[in-house]
């Protein structure tokens, strides 16, 4: 039933997924859950309809509108258990283990997703209760279903209440986009025999703002360029939607704004993209490294500006190369645009602008892979914020559409903490790999699938994801066994967390065969591992990519008029070390100029544009 790609030309333009967490296995075995159906939490039968044995019940879901002259299709049933993964976990009580079941049905129309429910006594084959879920219950595309079950006596309805059916559901809608095809497929499962390389992934670009020693704000173009300077294989960043449906890069669900001495929070779905890019908004925004206590916002900003002046080489080169070299593809289209673009660059160099996902694709080197994390709030977080969020289908469609239009030949992977978003990302497209993020128990959520590495592994395997991104502290003590377990099941294992900035932990993971390490201190790792601009890279997820493409001074990034021999004489390592824009930005139809041509006059900001 589940083709792995919800598409009109395949098994259907819609897929209904009814998710049911079962009772702990220990309870299901001994029937200790008295007072309600001991089969699972999908149904609750009244006492007179309870079977003697918990295992004597079966629930059958089937389409309510079968095609003419055909039998109703039954829902497919996917089950998986959160079984122990390591000796450490095996010490936990059996009641900590959960079993999940998901009922799945595909259809070409939304109306055809109406379904019926039969509660069957397995020992006799007798149907003891029936229910019906109309299309009105599914129009929200996600949520909770709750319907009554009616008893069936001798084949005739007596309309007595027998119990209730309650479950969560998700309708996966087709992503109707001209680029959503089977071309340029990057998705790939781990398998033995592939060239095994541990990728270095820059956390939120070149590192989170809160990380020690960081002076460039996370999730900005400047941060992405600095990650490229330090030869990061991928960068990881978070995306959200604005009120006008533009995909922007930002970590939190809300933005902190300073209004005088008052600090307020604005949810991103309430902010327009033009507001987020405005100079006034940027000046009012409190960055992650700033805090509002006793009027210290201004002091923090002054401190950051002083630090930025010492560490702005990359930003200065970008500023100078874009605005003083009209041959560059990002230069203003006409002299009339110069003042507006210059004003925008002032904000850019102040390190406080919002970056759109399209900007990230267009303003970073194509060899730099993107690990795009989709942030979606839990029900508890929605209540706390008091903001109505876009639906998961709408959010995933917006992100995927942008990526399909912009990715070119760039390596892209997706990750998310939200199980439903992970399912949507996998089912709506077949090009890109999808990873499930887990805190590994360092934080506790209402959904048990989010609470352990074991649950994440089982969920990823059952829903055919490509791997898991785990908080490193949850696996480091049993690293070898956990890595082997993931690889044996054909899954990649990435890690994130503060411990990844420790070189001892970093080295231990590389020896164990971790597939990628997300870290803040990309610069330190680059120096410690002696990464150079001409180092080869292995493409983890796209077999069509060359195993030897260069970073970041890739010849493929330059389109030049000099002969190849002359180009080869250039010191590409020197260009990369100064982050000259010729090495780090997409360039079309330009002549490569030597760095001696760069002007050295002071900028309007009062400090030299150093080379």
Image (cartoon, rainbow, N blue to C red):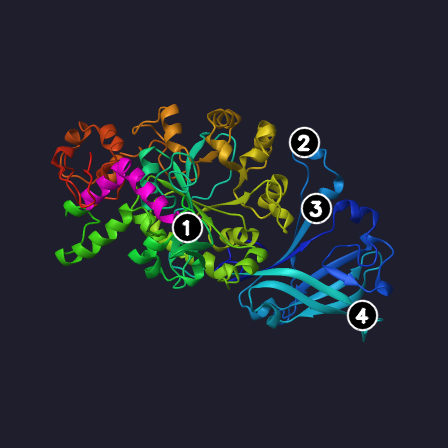
Q: To which residue does mark 3 refer?
A: 98
The residue where tag 2 is placed is 88
Quadrant of the frame with the N terminus: bottom right
Q: CA distance from mark 2 to mark 4?
A: 47 Å
Left or right, 415 with respect to 117, comes to left
Q: Nearer the viewer, mark 1 or mark 2?
A: 1
Q: Which residue is mark 4?
A: 151
Q: Nearer the viewer, mark 3 or mark 4?
A: 3
x and y percent of residue 337 in the render? 17, 57
Q: Is residue 307 magenta?
A: yes
Does the residue at mark 2 contact the one at mark 4 (Cβ under 8 Å)? Answer: no
Q: Is residue 324 left or right of residue 266?
A: left
Are discs 3 and 2 less than 8 Å apart at CB?
A: no
Label 1 neighbour load within 10 Å: few <14, some 14-19, many 20+ = many
* Distance between the alpha carbons at the discs numbered 3 and 2: 17 Å
Name the mark on residue 250. 1
Crowd tier of the residue under label 3, counting other residues whose Cα lies within 10 Å: few below 14, some 14–19, many 20 or above = some
Residue in view at x 74 percent, y 66 percent: 164
Label located before the other in sequence (3 or 1): 3
Task: Work out whether mark 4 precedes mark 1 in sequence or the reverse, and give the earlier one.
Answer: 4
């Amino acid at each position: 039933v589940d083709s792995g790609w919800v598409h009109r030309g395949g098994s259907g333009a819609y897929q209904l997924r009814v998710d049911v967490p079962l009772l702990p296995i220990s309870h299901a075995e001994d029937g200790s859950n008295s007072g309600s159906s001991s089969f699972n939490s999908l149904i609750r039968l009244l006492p007179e309809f309870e079977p003697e044995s918990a295992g004597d019940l079966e629930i059958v879901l089937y389409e309510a509108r079968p095609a003419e002259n055909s039998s109703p299709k039954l829902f497919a049933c996917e089950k998986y258990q959160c079984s122990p993964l390591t000796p450490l976990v095996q010490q936990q009580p059996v009641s900590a283990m959960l079993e999940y079941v998901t009922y799945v049905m595909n259809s070409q129309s939304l109306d055809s997703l109406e379904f019926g429910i039969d509660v069957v006594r397995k020992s006799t084959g007798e149907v003891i209760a029936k229910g019906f879920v109309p299309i009105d219950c599914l129009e929200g595309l996600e949520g909770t279903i709750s319907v009554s079950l009616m008893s069936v006596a001798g084949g005739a309805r007596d309309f007595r209440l027998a119990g209730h059916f309650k479950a969560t559901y998700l309708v996966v809608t087709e992503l109707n986009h001209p680029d959503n095809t089977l071309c340029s497929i990057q998705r790939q499962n781990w398998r033995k025999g592939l060239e095994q390389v541990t990728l270095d992934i820059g956390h939120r670009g070149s590192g989170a703002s809160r990380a020690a020693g960081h002076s460039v704000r996370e999730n900005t173009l400047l941060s992405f360029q600095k990650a490229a300077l330090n030869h990061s294989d991928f960068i990881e960043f978070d995306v959200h939607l604005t009120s006008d449906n533009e995909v922007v890069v930002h970590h939190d669900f809300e933005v902190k704004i300073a209004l005088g001495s008052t600090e307020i929070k604005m949810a991103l779905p309430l902010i327009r993209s033009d507001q987020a890019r405005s100079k006034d908004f940027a000046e009012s925004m409190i960055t992650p490294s700033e805090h509002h206590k006793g009027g210290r916002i201004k002091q923090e900003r002054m401190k950051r500006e002083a630090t930025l002046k010492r560490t702005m080489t990359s930003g200065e080169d970008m500023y100078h190369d874009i605005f003083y070299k009209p041959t560059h593809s990002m230069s203003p289209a006409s002299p009339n645009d110069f003042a507006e673009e210059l004003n925008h660059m002032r904000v850019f160099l102040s390190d406080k602008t919002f970056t759109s996902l399209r900007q990230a694709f267009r303003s970073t080197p194509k060899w730099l892979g993107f690990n795009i994390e989709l942030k979606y709030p839990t029900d508890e977080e929605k209540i706390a914020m008091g903001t109505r969020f876009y639906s998961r289908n709408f959010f995933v469609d917006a992100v995927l559409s942008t990526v399909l239009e912009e990715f070119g030949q760039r390596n892209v992977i997706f990750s998310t903490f939200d199980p439903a978003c992970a399912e949507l990302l996998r089912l709506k497209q077949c090009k890109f790999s999808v990873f499930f993020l887990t805190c590994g128990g360092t934080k506790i959520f209402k959904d048990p699938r989010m609470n352990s590495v074991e649950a994440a592994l089982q969920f990823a395997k059952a829903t055919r994801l490509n791997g898991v991104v785990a908080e490193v502290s949850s696996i480091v003590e049993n690293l070898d066994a956990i890595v082997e377990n993931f690889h044996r099941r054909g899954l990649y294992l990435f890690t994130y967390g503060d411990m990844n900035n420790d070189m001892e932990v970093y080295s231990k993971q590389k020896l164990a065969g971790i597939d990628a390490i997300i870290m803040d201190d990309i610069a330190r790792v680059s120096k410690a591992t002696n990464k150079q601009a001409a180092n080869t890279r292995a493409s983890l997820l796209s077999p069509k990519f060359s195993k030897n493409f260069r970073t970041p001074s890739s010849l493929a990034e330059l389109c030049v008029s000099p002969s190849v021999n002359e180009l080869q004489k250039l010191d590409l390592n020197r260009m990369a070390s100064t982050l000259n824009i010729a090495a780090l930005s997409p360039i079309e139809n330009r002549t490569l100029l030597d760095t001696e041509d760069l002007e050295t006059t002071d900028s309007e900001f009062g400090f030299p544009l150093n080379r």
